[in-house]
């Protein structure tokens, strides 16, 4: 029996003479004189190639563009790659012939083709011909190639080939590298998969016929130097980066349309931001303390000092109508929380109770009554079957929707709490100037130290950023990904803070200190911060700190704001003046007012909500009442 050996790269050596590598014949476009092609190192600045010959003997400088910062040869290579990627292979060939610059070397072209065809023997041979330099890069590339070969063998049911690849090609490449050893253990477990579908599910792999080979190319490009192998769709990536840079630089970019023209620089106006009162909701008979849009943007819920909560329906034309009045609290509810699928909603407040309601019918489904003091906040777990409540009684409870207590924590009076969208972290604030982050999986907590007591918090949709409203008339923006304070908002004295990564973007006229004021993120890219105020106005900032608008309209403290998560042109504000104001843009306002006028046309003497809003807006805006906030909103 012939012995089988492997070298240190996991390749099989069977003492046979090496096979010749296949070479594809170079295709020549008819009627174009054949010229030698230059293959330059990406980004090279070789003196002998300071100029490139193109066209009819014209010379082009090595660097082109308005600032002479674009390498000509690299640019031509990217153009050729883009043309081929769009299916214009003949045009790409003409570009190569006329410029004398080859997009990719023949070795790289063969390497790519062998991968896409699953010709693993020639793929390995091509690796030897690539000028990689570092043998560790070669080993890392071979590991990914053999992994693809192994998975394809399992998919085809070729167990002997899979076992041979695992033992003789993959295993030798794992020596002294724990990450590859762990991956080898994972790959071995796939031998137990009883079908191709099960394999793809367990390995999170798309299969040989569904793009996995192209995915392998993308992975290899992260390893191979770009001078050797151009990253896929590189010109498209650069153009997209330029567009995203323009969007980020645009203070008023707030649109549902993801497409941006390439023909001019991108600029938006303030008209993209909701700054117009489109509707005033007046069904509450006392101060409105909290409101929140549902995740699907189809409902709005509000909680009031009148002991009721109201569910509002957001209509397709942008108008909002009352859907259900939730009656059951014996004292004022101060907080609402939508379950992840928006079929249920929690309300809690000063009667120490938590109520679970059915959104469709408005019926109460369950009453939770273990807290011994006002319940300040509650938040759902992502699966929609559990939630956490916090109270000034210094307890937090985790419940299921059937009313069973699953866990509890004690320690500090809870001012507010949120759960990150992935369900891993519970974030709480209390009177001790601390933001506490509890990790459910690790069962531990970390703390962020603040400068004052935190009265409320709001988390971004991706869970990375946290807004912390402080009793010292400041809002802080925390980057939870880095555990750093990245900005300090709305500081009256505008002094430079000494805290790490803190900067100011608060108008000196904005007030906060005696009441609980809630802020939130908003806009199409969640790049805006909107906040209420004790001076009866609503403030809108860009995330980078620029104050964009100060909106009058309310005649009492603005306690809470909520931006519609599916409609960037709508947010709502709740106030001590017993009203909820809905804000929109100039364009959406026209549609909404037409709908409202149509619904009230049977009563010609009645005024529209917009007319009432306009009348309120021209009145002098008084400051907040000097009367103290009830227990649910007082600042300790």
Image (cartoon, helix red, strand yellow):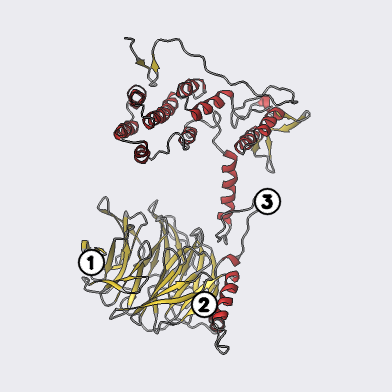
Asked if residue 224 shows in the view, the reply is yes
Which label sits on residue 263? 3
Question: Marks 2 and 3: CB-CB under 8 Å?
Answer: no
Residue tagged 1: 403
Count of marks overlaid on the render = 3
How far apart marks 2 and 3 lie (CA) works out to: 38 Å
Give residue 549's position: percent from left, percent from top. Answer: 55, 69
Mark found first going from the N terminus, 1 or 3: 3
10 Å crowding of disc 1: few (<14), some (14-19), many (20+): some
The residue furthest bottom is: 605
Q: CA distance from mark 2 to mark 1?
A: 38 Å
Up/down of 295 relative to 90, above or below: below
Q: Earlier in the sequence, mark 2 or mark 1?
A: 2
Q: Which of the two discs, 1 and 3, sits closer to the camera?
A: 1
Using the numbered discs, state the Cα–Cα distance from disc 1 to disc 3 in whole angstroms: 59 Å
Nearer the viewer's eye, disc 2 or disc 1?
1
User: Can you identify the residue that label 2 sits on?
Assistant: 279
Q: Find residue 636 and report its image quarter.
A: bottom left
Q: Secondary structure at mark 1?
A: loop
Residue lying at 52% horizontally and 79% vertically, measured from the top left: 553
Q: Position of residue 39 (x, y in %)?
A: 62, 25
Q: Is residue 301 above or below residue 20?
A: below
Tell me the crowding category of disc 3: few under 14, some 14 to 19, or many 20 or more residues within 10 angstroms, Cα based: few
Residue 507 shows up from this direction: no
């Amino acid at each position: 029996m012939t012995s089988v050996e492997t070298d240190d790269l996991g390749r099989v050596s069977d003492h046979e003479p090496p096979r010749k590598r296949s070479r594809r014949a170079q295709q020549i476009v008819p009627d174009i004189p054949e010229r030698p092609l230059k293959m330059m190192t990406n980004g090279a600045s070789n003196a002998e190639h300071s100029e490139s010959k193109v066209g009819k003997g014209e010379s082009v400088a090595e660097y082109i563009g308005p600032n002479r910062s674009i390498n000509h040869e690299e640019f031509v290579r990217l153009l050729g790659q883009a043309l081929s990627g769009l299916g214009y292979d003949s045009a790409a060939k003409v570009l190569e012939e006329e410029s004398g610059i080859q997009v990719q070397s023949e070795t790289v072209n063969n390497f790519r083709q062998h991968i896409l065809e699953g010709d693993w023997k020639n793929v390995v041979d091509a690796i030897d011909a690539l000028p990689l330099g570092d043998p560790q890069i070669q080993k890392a590339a071979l590991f990914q190639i053999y992994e693809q070969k192994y998975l394809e063998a399992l998919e085809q049911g070729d167990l002997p080939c899979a076992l041979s690849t695992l033992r003789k090609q993959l295993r030798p490449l794992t020596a002294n590298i724990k990450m590859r050893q762990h991956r080898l253990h994972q790959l071995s477990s796939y031998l137990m998969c009883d079908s191709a579908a099960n394999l793809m599910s367990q390995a999170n792999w798309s299969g040989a016929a569904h793009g996995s080979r192209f995915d392998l190319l993308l992975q290899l490009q992260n390893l191979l130097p770009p001078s050797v192998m151009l990253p896929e769709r590189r010109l498209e990536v650069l153009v997209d980066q330029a567009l995203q840079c323009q969007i980020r630089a645009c203070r008023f970019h707030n649109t549902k349309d993801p497409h941006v023209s390439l023909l001019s620089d991108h600029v938006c106006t303030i008209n993209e931001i909701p700054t117009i009162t489109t509707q005033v909701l007046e069904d509450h008979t006392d101060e409105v303390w909290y409101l929140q849009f549902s995740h699907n943007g189809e409902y709005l819920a509000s909680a009031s000092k009148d002991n009721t909560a109201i569910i509002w329906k957001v209509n397709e034309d942008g108008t909002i109508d009352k859907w259900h009045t939730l009656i059951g609290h014996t004292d004022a509810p101060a907080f609402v929380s939508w379950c992840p699928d928006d079929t249920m909603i929690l309300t809690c407040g000063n009667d120490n109770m938590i109520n679970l309601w059915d959104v469709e019918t408005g019926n109460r489904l369950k009453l939770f009554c273990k807290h011994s003091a006002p319940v300040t906040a509650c938040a759902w777990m992502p699966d929609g079957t559990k939630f956490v409540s916090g109270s000034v009684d210094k307890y937090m409870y985790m419940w299921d929707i059937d009313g069973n207590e699953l866990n509890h924590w004690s320690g500090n009076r809870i001012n507010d709490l949120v759960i990150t969208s992935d369900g891993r972290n519970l974030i709480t604030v209390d009177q001790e100037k601390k933001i506490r982050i509890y990790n459910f999986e690790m069962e531990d907590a970390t703390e962020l130290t603040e400068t004052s007591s935190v009265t409320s918090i709001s988390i971004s949709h991706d869970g990375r950023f946290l807004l912390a409203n402080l009793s010292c008339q400041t809002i802080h923006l925390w980057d939870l990904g880095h555990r750093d304070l990245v900005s300090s908002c709305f500081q009256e004295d505008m002094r430079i803070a000494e805290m790490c990564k803190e900067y100011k973007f608060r108008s000196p006229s904005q007030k906060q200190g005696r009441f609980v004021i809630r802020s939130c993120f908003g806009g199409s890219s969640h790049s805006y911060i909107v906040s209420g105020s004790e001076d009866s106005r609503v403030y809108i900032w860009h995330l980078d700190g620029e104050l964009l608008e100060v909106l009058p309209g309310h005649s009492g403290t603005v306690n809470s704001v909520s931006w519609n998560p599916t409609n960037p042109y709508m947010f709502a504000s709740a106030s001590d003046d017993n009203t909820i104001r809905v804000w929109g843009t100039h364009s959406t306002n026209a549609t909404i007012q037409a709908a409202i006028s149509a619904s009230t046309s049977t009563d010609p003497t009645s005024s529209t909500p917009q007319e009432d809003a306009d009348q309120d807006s021209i009145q002098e805006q008084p400051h907040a009442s000097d009367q103290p906030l009830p227990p649910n909103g007082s600042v300790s």
